[in-house]
Amino acid sequence: MSQPVITVEGLGKRYTLQHQASSGLLRDQLAGFLRNPFRRSKAANATAEDFWALRKVGFAVNQGDILGIIGRNGAGKSTLLKILSRITEPTTGRVSLRGRVASLLEVGTGFHGELSGRENIFLNGAILGMTRTEIRRKFDEIVAFAEVEKFLDTPVKHYSSGMYVRLAFAVAAHLEPEILIIDEVLAVGDQEFQKKCLGKIEKVTRNEGRTVLFVSHNFAAVRQLCTRAILLHEGRVVTDAPPVETITQYMKMMPRSQGSSAYRHIAGDGRARITALRLNAPPGAAPVYPIFENIRIDIDFTVQSSVGALEFFLLVYAEDGECLTASFQRDTGPFTKSSGPTGTVSAVFKNPFAPGRYLVSAGIFDSTRQFLDWVEFAESFQVETGFADGRAFDQRLGRFSLLPEWRT
Amino acid sequence: MTETSNPSEAPTLVLEAGRTEAHYWRDLWRYRELLGFLAWRDVKVRYKQAVLGVAWAVVQPVVQTFLLTFVFSKLAKMPGGDIPYPLLVLAGLLPWQLFSGAFSGAGSSLVTNANLISKVYFPRLIVPLSAVVVALIDMAVLLVLTGGYAAFAGVAPTWRLLLLPLFIFGTMLIALGAGLWITALTVKYRDFRFIAPFILQVGVFVTPVGYRTDFLPNWRDILAFNPLTSMVEGFRWCMFGGHSEFYVRGLATSLAMTAALLASGLWFFRQTERKFADVI
């Protein structure tokens, strides 16, 4: 194999955080100057603090690789992508990119609600770096991919959110750069369409030797799609390995119960919010359960305004990032009526999981299934190598234990 | 897929602190279509949203023409020569509208395009440039109106009209220079959003939109420091032929001022530009 397509060496990015007074208003700086004419106004009324979003990041990507980038919020993923897509400059280090780069940091960047679908395809294509002839050539393909033929001349402000996202994706999916940089964008859109997009990306890389950088929280996608993944933590690359290994590393770093203030809210509009997940355990002890023991998860929440009925859901992840189960309140019971400003909902189940460590995510829908909140990997629990009745756990295959009724 | 991609043949792009310089002008050329699209979007959206559509581009200058004619001709009793005074004002409003449209458009352009700037790379110079293009299109509407009025008033065009594009271009350069300054300053100091309209309020009087400089010999050299002065004169010279004389020394001053404004604007804009995405 020839040289790598992307080489990143010693990359660092420093942001200067301005505390209080200096608001970037000329009048403040003038006022500061008048008050204290012999000192630089900046030094007089503000303290600046350096913050390194990235430090000494280095990696290389070969042609045809799909590199996954994972890490918590604030780990530096977005900064890295912004540097690679030339939106901002690095403070130290260098990056070399061989080939045309297209980046997709947001779905539908530059879409304008007043313009029709047709017009937005051209506008968005140009923004993403396509030429007019290129867009014209792929126009029909884009429209077919997005499934919006009938609404081409309708202003996109009248589109449903699904249609909007589909159209935006479709334009991006038809870019033909040598290097494609994608951020988190697959988190939106319906399942069916997500699959179609992932398929398209995969096809493009496999068949045409393109290189993809892919940031996502969707570990299933990272595992399925990526050939390699790096884990960023506090601005540094801590793992650079095959995706399953990197995801496992990430999950291991997840909550050593840092408390509910560290929860990552990855969806929802905040009309209701999860304030804590509590797993039943003796005070001060970490939650550890034998198989078939009752697990009780209490979800504390606050309600901002009247949102009507709330529907809760729970997700349990294994340490390799696979989501093992998703339980919705609609499966088994009535929804929760939000009466007061705060409340608690409990889920009780017999622990079916095989020994190991598990992470719990939880969320709330309103009655129309709009996300109100979704906290990811908020808490974790351990399953010990034994059953609730005291029997030891013998080595076996599988991740679940059912309680079948054996008929003889 | 017709294109074959072979990265070993593709140009290598190196990103380092302070390295954007190298590709800037080439990139600007490569992104010229985006410039067209952004301008097209702004024009289209404006005329789609306003119920009056094109009428808005007409009503505003018509009202302004009446006001300026009233103030300068009727109240201040400024002489108009043998050109109908409203026509004199309209000819002055043409470059002025081009300038002020581009200037205020550029000032707000980074706020309206904030999400583009934080999500996509393109030479940022395109943003104020597209404001100039939008203003040019608005001016074209006014130009048609002025032409109609001139025909009605019986002012016949001469060969000089062919030189009008030169003055339009000159006005665009001034508008771009000032637009670059205001764009970069607005990003750096948000309160320039409020200072920009004030500059325009003063500007319409400092520029001879509502009066003729050839009747103010003592002031001509001072007014020439405003580069727009010569452009206004130039517009009138092109449109009314021998009825308005042209002041060559003023034009020289104006061109020097334009060059200085444009060069300093470019320099300042390029200085500030690389921090745009971090600040917005």
Image (spheres, grey):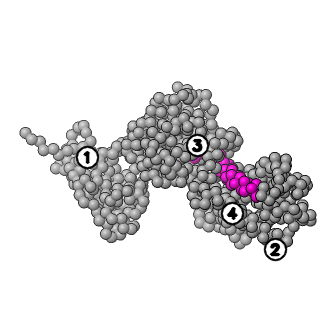
Which residue is at 31% across, 69% downward?
A339
Q: Position of residue B128 (x, y in %)?
A: 68, 52
Which residue is at 43% across, 52% downward?
A160
Label 2 element class: helix
Residue position for label 4: B60
Q: Earlier in the sequence, mark 4 or mark 2?
A: 4
Q: CA distance from mark 4 to mark 2?
A: 21 Å
Q: Which mark is residue A353?
A: 1
Q: Residues within 10 Å of mark 1 (few under 14, many from 20)?
A: many
Same chain shared by disc 1 and disc 3? yes
Magenta residues span: B120-149
Residue position for label 3: A126
Residue position for label 2: B75
Same chain shared by disc 2 and disc 3? no
Is residue B217 covered in magenta? no
Label 1 element class: loop
Label 4 element class: helix
Between A134 and B261, the one nearer to me in the picture: A134
Q: Amino acid at mark 4?
A: Gln
Which quadrant of the figure contains the C terminus of chain A?
top left
Q: Position of residue A372 (x, y in %)?
A: 38, 59
Between A78 and A380, the one nearer to me in the picture: A78
Q: Amino acid at mark 3?
A: Ala
Q: Amino acid at mark 1?
A: Phe
- Quarter of the image for residue B55 reads bottom right
